[in-house]
Amino acid sequence: MSGQLSVLRIGFGTMVSTNSSSDEEKAKEEEAFQHLANLGGNTVLKVEYPLMYLHVSKHYFELIGRFTGKGAADIPQFGTNTDKWDGNASFGLDLYGEASTTNKDIKFFFSGNYNKVNGTSEFRENLGSKSNNFFLGQVTVGLIILNNIKLSLNVFTHRNESKLRGRNIIIGGQFLH
């Protein structure tokens, strides 16, 4: 859910993820990476400040630039492979573009972001990372159908640590509103 607070957009979200590994340690790392690449954790608070907004008439094409700040946590009681609480905070830049059909029933979108991430030692351990602070960049493309269903593909992730580069494409789905 999200809403406006003056010029700020505030959002709160939760995430459920799954993995295909039977190895408990690998499953924990896969789940931690899925959480990081999507929202940041299974519980997330996000704040966005607009930097740029461009559009053509009737809003068939839009481009939005914003500064983002996010606090996220994996809380074991909310269903996760970790048995201890972990958390992270990030801030960075986000660019979002959208093109819609004339009836706006189908929208194609892309999103690119680059963030500085700082996490707890448990966050680092769950991720299998060498450091609990790093830079993370991502590119996502997708489709929004009837303003209610959002399908996305995380097609590129850049991380300044080689262990977390070259991961599989992450497919996501959301029900909007």
Image (spheres, grey):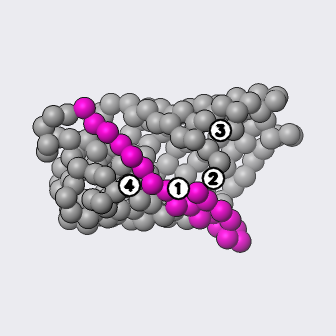
Q: Which residues are magenta?
A: 1-20
Query: Which sits in the foreground, 34 or 14?
Result: 14
- Foreground tag (3 vs 1): 3
Q: The residue tagged with tag 2: helix, strand or loop? A: strand
Is 15 part of what is drawn in magenta? yes
- Foreground tag (4 vs 1): 4
- Foreground tag (2 vs 3): 3
User: CB of mark 2 within 8 Å of CB of mark 1?
Assistant: yes
Farthest-out residue, bottom: 6
For disc 2, the marked residue is: 65
Which residue type carries mark 4? Asn
Residue 115: image location, x then y, percent:
43, 56
Which residue type carries mark 3? Asn
43 on left or right of 112: left
47 on left or right of 32: right
For disc 1, the marked residue is: 93
Q: Earlier in the sequence, mark 2 or mark 1?
A: 2
Disc on res. 148: 3
Residue 125: image location, x then y, percent:
18, 56
- Foreground tag (4 vs 2): 4
Q: Is residue 91 visible?
A: no
Residue at figure coordinates x 76%, y 28% from the top left: 101
Which residue type carries mark 1? Leu
